Image (cartoon, rainbow, N blue to C red):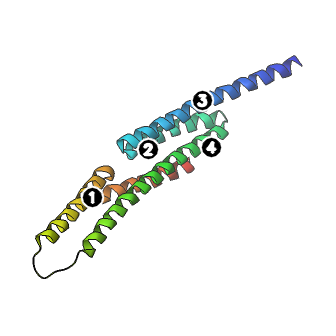
Amino acid sequence: MANAVASYDQLAHQVEALRKENSHLRRELEDNSNHLSKTGDRDEVLKQLQSKLEQEAGTLASSGRSDVLHQLKGLALNLLLGEIDREERERCWYFSQLEALSQKLAQLPRIDTFSLQMDLIRQQLEFEAQKVRSVMEERFGTSDEMVQRTQFSLIFMCKVVYM
């Protein structure tokens, strides 16, 4: 009976240790996600996260704690997918702003004679569109950088899944 109690206590202690470790790693993943949101440098954060996950994967696999490893993979993927979704919604918002400005430009009447008022309205709309494009490029980078970031995210997800 005493042996069973000791075994139960050891198991309870291991479960508590795993919970603490899981909480610590969850906070670390959330911190990385917050850092990612602030800096926008997803590639660097993903590289760091991948390195830490690979280290933990080796440790957890060798100690037979594959359930925690699966939880970590799930957390990493959920954080990344959440970040991708947030970025996509933000990008869609910018595109909708550009579309609205384009529609306003297209709706301006075409007149044969020069109109200072129409010219100023057209210039203002073009200026606003350029400003939105500049903010968008500053936020997300160039089109090539967006493609590279997406490719890197896909590679990261594949590595996490097949880790």
> Around disc 4, counting alpha carbons within 10 Å, would you say few (fewer than 14), some (14 to 19), or many (20 or more)?
some
Decide which of 48, 93 is in the foreground and name it.
93
Marked residue nearer the N-terminal end (2 or 1): 2
For label 4, the residue is: 70
Marked residue nearer the N-terminal end (3 or 4): 3
> Around disc 3, counting alpha carbons within 10 Å, would you say few (fewer than 14), some (14 to 19), or many (20 or more)?
few
Q: Residue type at mark 3?
A: Glu
Marked residue nearer the N-terminal end (3 or 2): 3
Percent across and percent down for residue 104 are: 28, 70
Nearest to viewer (mark 4 / mark 1): 1
Nearest to viewer (mark 1 / mark 3): 1
For label 2, the residue is: 46
For label 1, the residue is: 133
> Around disc 1, counting alpha carbons within 10 Å, would you say few (fewer than 14), some (14 to 19), or many (20 or more)?
some
Q: Quadrant of residue 48?
A: top left
Q: Using the rendered image of the protein, determine whether residue 147 is visible from the camera's viewpoint.
A: no
